[in-house]
Every structure is written in structure tokens, then in C-alpha cells.
Amino acid sequence: MLIAQRPPGKSHAGRWEFPGGKFELGESATAALARELREEIGVDIRDPELLCTLEHDYPQRRVRLHLFAVERYTGEPVALDGQALKWVALGALATEDILEADRPFVAALQRRFAAAI
């Protein structure tokens, strides 16, 4: 699984998350994912699969997150937003310093890709 480190100067700097980002006005979750992955890591995705949606309360705000599995894409992931990127085996994700909001996604990914662990 590909994870990205929050760059210095952003909230939760140094912590790890799944790549993606905020919606623009009128944008669907799939369109936001495609745009964000193109902007952040330089890949164009095909056939993303929505696995789950959740909400998380941080002290300063509530966020709604959508987890997609992206198995088909073109391009090679490159850090275009000043973040570090790394590939982590699915079974090792639980040992990473993943943001609290993204932690439930680890279990969802393990259920979806159980045969790969």
C-alpha cells in the first residue's frame, strides 16, 4: 500500500496517511480522488473501487473520508507535494504512524485484500 507523510508546515506533519485530499465544490468523491492523485503523486487512475466512507472528529474539525482501492493506474507515483512516499506491505500498515482518521482504513484494506497478507 502506498502511504504519504504529511510535510512540514501542515497539520500533523510527519504522520502518515493514504494519498488523496479535499473535494472541490461540486466534485464527486471519484473525481476528487482522480484529481488529487494526479496533483499529489502524478498518476492517472482507472476503475477505483470505493471500499468505505467514515467520519472522524479532530479537535478542530470533523472530516469525512472515502477509502478507494486503486489497482490500475498509469504513471509512477512521485512526491509532487513535498511529501515523502513509501510502499508498505498490507500486513505492516498497523505498525506505521498512520493518522487516527485513517486507522480504520487499515482494517478495511486487510478485509478487502485478505488473500494478499
Image: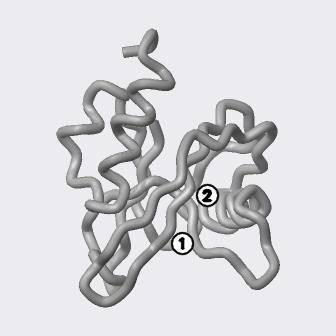
Q: Alpha carbon of mark 1 to alpha carbon of mark 2: how far?
A: 8 Å
Residue shown at 70%/61% (left/top)? 29
Mark 1 and mark 2 residues within 8 Å of each other at the beta carbon? yes
Earlier in the chain: of badge 1 and badge 2, it is 2
Left or right: residue 82 versus residue 43 is left
Count residues near mark 2 (Cα–Cα under 10 Å), then give few for <14, some for 14-19, many for 20+: many
Residue 39: mark in rendering: none
Secondary structure, mark 1, is loop
Q: Quadrant of the N terminus?
A: top left
Against 97, residue 81 (above or below) is below
Left or right: residue 94 versus residue 21 is left
Residue shown at 42%/36% (left/top)? 108
Res 32 quadrant in image: bottom right
Report which residue position mark 1 lands on: 81
Count residues near mark 1 (Cα–Cα under 10 Å), then give few for <14, some for 14-19, many for 20+: few
Secondary structure, mark 2, is helix
The three-letter code of the residue at mark 1 reads Asp
Report which residue position mark 2 lands on: 41
Res 7 quadrant in image: bottom left
Against 67, residue 47 (above or below) is above
Q: How many marks?
A: 2
Q: Position of residue 43 (x, y in %)?
A: 71, 50
Q: Quadrant of the C terminus?
A: top left
Q: Position of residue 9 (x, y in %)?
A: 34, 87
Q: Nearer the viewer, residue 5 or 112?
A: 112
Q: Nearer the viewer, residue 110 or 95?
A: 110
The three-letter code of the residue at mark 2 reads Ile
Q: Position of residue 73 (x, y in %)?
A: 74, 38
